[in-house]
Amino acid sequence: MSLLINRRALKLRLLVGTAFDKKEQKNTLDLVEKWWLSYKAWEERDTFIAAFRQGRMTIRQAPASETYGEYMGKDGGTAFGARRGDEERKPYPKERYRVGMDSIKDRLKPSNFGMDGGERLKYKHGLHDLSGSLCAPTVPLLSKQVRWKWGKLSEWITIFMPMAQPEDLELFSLLNSLAKQSQATWPEMYIRVAEMRKQMSRIKLADSVDIGAGLHDVSPPDSDVPKFRYGVKQPLDSNRALTGVDLVRSQKALNYTSILPTGPANSNTNEIVIAYRQHAGVRFPLFTRWNAEENAFLCFEDEPSSKTVIDKKIPDAWERTLQV
């Protein structure tokens, strides 16, 4: 069955409200697996041009390797800090945050998430969410919408990564929420959805402006165990849920193409928060570096995804990109 049919069938079942009833669990799990298999098959077939034209292509720029704090016995050179209440940059000497290309590759490995003997692996490896930009198909040149920092376009690595269709992100968000609510009564489904979380890249926050994203410790005031969220600005409510502009931006993330310009535009300025996860197939992520003489982003020769791009380059005029 197609992704569209499986998505609609599962969403309808979840919205009815009885999908997690004990007598319905087998049928629900069957639909979940059908949707997931069809989604991953679609993801493997996805191409650069298709994702770009549909407003699903994201860009992140980063050095090859960079760590805030200490990782694997090596000091990254910059102390790790995060906002905590009114303190703008509270130090966390036992934590780290990795933001380079090498850390993107680690985020693609499901084994780097979850728990190990009570230890949160995402925290152990410093693999919190990252910022990026959503590309606009109505802007013909990449150089008019890439948000490089401090003029380092040719020095830093530009990473292209498509996202799931908004309908699938919305469906997964609903499934994830229901699975968490039913963890005690249906732990098998919670475990299955937790595995899916390790294998589905997602946009967490989205806005058409620069949101000034950074890490925020949103753990309860009396807790000594940090809980970091990237891009969060407002205090959580009594149920530890997002509020204010953070809630609005999380809702926009489920329909993320809504932040893009709707007509012809000369430039594109937005910010999204991305959870990079395992991607089916070898086409993505694409690791590139800007070359002014070629007027293109050149793919790295030794990366498997580079072999899928004709001439191993993403032209500034992105519609000229050819991918096998």
Image: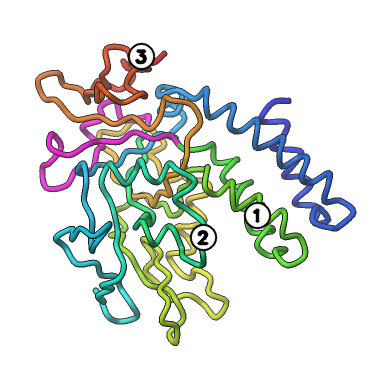
Q: Quadrant of residue 266?
A: top left
Indicate whether 193 appears above or below 143: below
Work out how far the residue at label 1 is from the one at label 3, CA to CA, in angstroms.
39 Å
165 or 81: nearer the viewer: 81
Give the structural element (helix, strand or loop) at label 3. Answer: loop
Nearer the viewer's eye, disc 1 or disc 3? 1
> Residue 56 vs residue 27: left or right?
left
User: In the drawing, what numbered circle is on residue 298?
Assistant: none
Label 2 sits on what residue type?
Answer: Met
Horizontal and vertical percent for residue 161?
39, 35
**Residue at image coords 67%, 57%:** 190
Horizontal and vertical percent for residue 85?
34, 80
**Mark closer to the chain start, 2 or 3:** 2
> Residue 49 vs residue 144: left or right?
right
Horizontal and vertical percent for residue 265?
30, 34
Q: Quadrant of residue 12?
A: top right
**Residue at image coords 43%, 49%:** 275
208 or 172: nearer the viewer: 172
Quadrant for the N terminus, please: top right
> Residue 40 vs residue 295: left or right?
right
Q: Which residue is mark 1?
A: 191
Work out how far the residue at label 2 is from the one at label 1, CA to CA, in angstroms.
12 Å
Work out how far the residue at label 2 is from the one at label 3, CA to CA, in angstroms.
40 Å
Residue 284 highlighted magenta (yes or no): no
253 or 182: nearer the viewer: 182
Q: Which residue is mark 2?
A: 115
Which segment is the magenta one? Answer: 137-162
Label 3 sits on what residue type?
Answer: Leu
Quadrant for the C terminus, please: top left
**Mark closer to the chain start, 1 or 3:** 1
**Mark closer to the chain start, 2 or 1:** 2
Q: Which residue is mark 3?
A: 322
